[in-house]
Image (tube, rainbow, N blue to C red):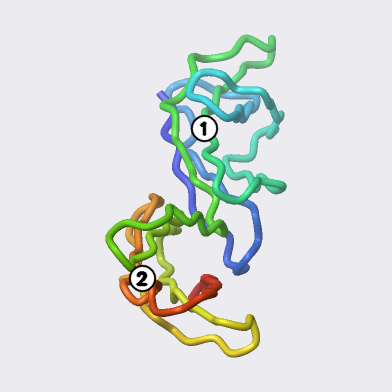
Amino acid sequence: MLALFFCLSNAPGAQNVRLEWNPLKGLAAAGYFLYYGPEKGAYTNKIDMGNSTTASVSGLQEGQTYHFAVTAYNTSGVESALSSDVSYITPGLLRVLGTMNIGSMGMEFPVAPGHWYEVQASEDMQAWTTIGQTELATSNAWTQFSDPQAGQFSTRFYRLVLH
């Protein structure tokens, strides 16, 4: 059985993910294939990793969920069963949900473990004010935020700052 896990790249704004897995025990693996795609079990990409147990996958779209799994293969090219599926939501997208309560604007965005985010607002996209922040994220998930003062402005722009 292969165990697969991920960690976010150190570079803020980078749209890649670094994956690591434990080597297959009990069998001498000649190498590993990394599979990934938009749905669990529907992997549209396959990368031969050789005997490496780490990979960096780049070119991921912000706000999209990707699923990853690994197989080991022997010198004859016979593959093991797929590892457990690991999903990853690529950070960097702020999705406005619309009015949540009278005068309140809702939004959501994916967060990455080990980071926290500032939500900033502006009327002119020149001067930005921090209107809230998240806690340090411990998992890769969608977070919701509400701006209760949105109704006080005729125009309001939003952005996220990754820390």
- The alpha-carbon separation of the residues under discs 2 and 1 comes to 32 Å
In the rendered image, residue 142, in percent from the top left (x then y), is placed at 39, 51
Q: Determine whether the residue tagged by mark 1 lies in a helix, strand or loop.
A: strand
Q: Which comes before the other along the chain, label 2 or label 1?
A: 1
Of the residues shown, which amino acid type is indicated by label 2? Asp
Q: How crowded is mark 2: few (under 14 residues within 10 Å), some or many (20 or more)?
A: some
Please, is residue 64 above or below residue 128 in the view?
A: above
Q: In which quarter of the image is residue 133?
A: bottom left
Q: Residues within 10 Å of mark 1 (few under 14, many from 20)?
A: many
Of the residues shown, which amino acid type is indicated by label 1? His
The residue depicted at 64 percent of the width and 52 percent of the height is 16
The residue that disc 2 covers is 147
In the rendered image, residue 72, in percent from the top left (x then y), is placed at 56, 22
Q: Determine whether the residue tagged by mark 2 lies in a helix, strand or loop.
A: strand
Mark count: 2
Please, is residue 48 above or below residue 77 in the view?
A: below
162 sits to left or right of 46: left
124 sits to left or right of 105: right
110 or 66, nearer to the observer:
110
The residue that disc 1 covers is 67
Please, is residue 73 above or below residue 111 in the view?
A: above
126 or 50, nearer to the observer:
126
The residue depicted at 44 percent of the width and 28 percent of the height is 85
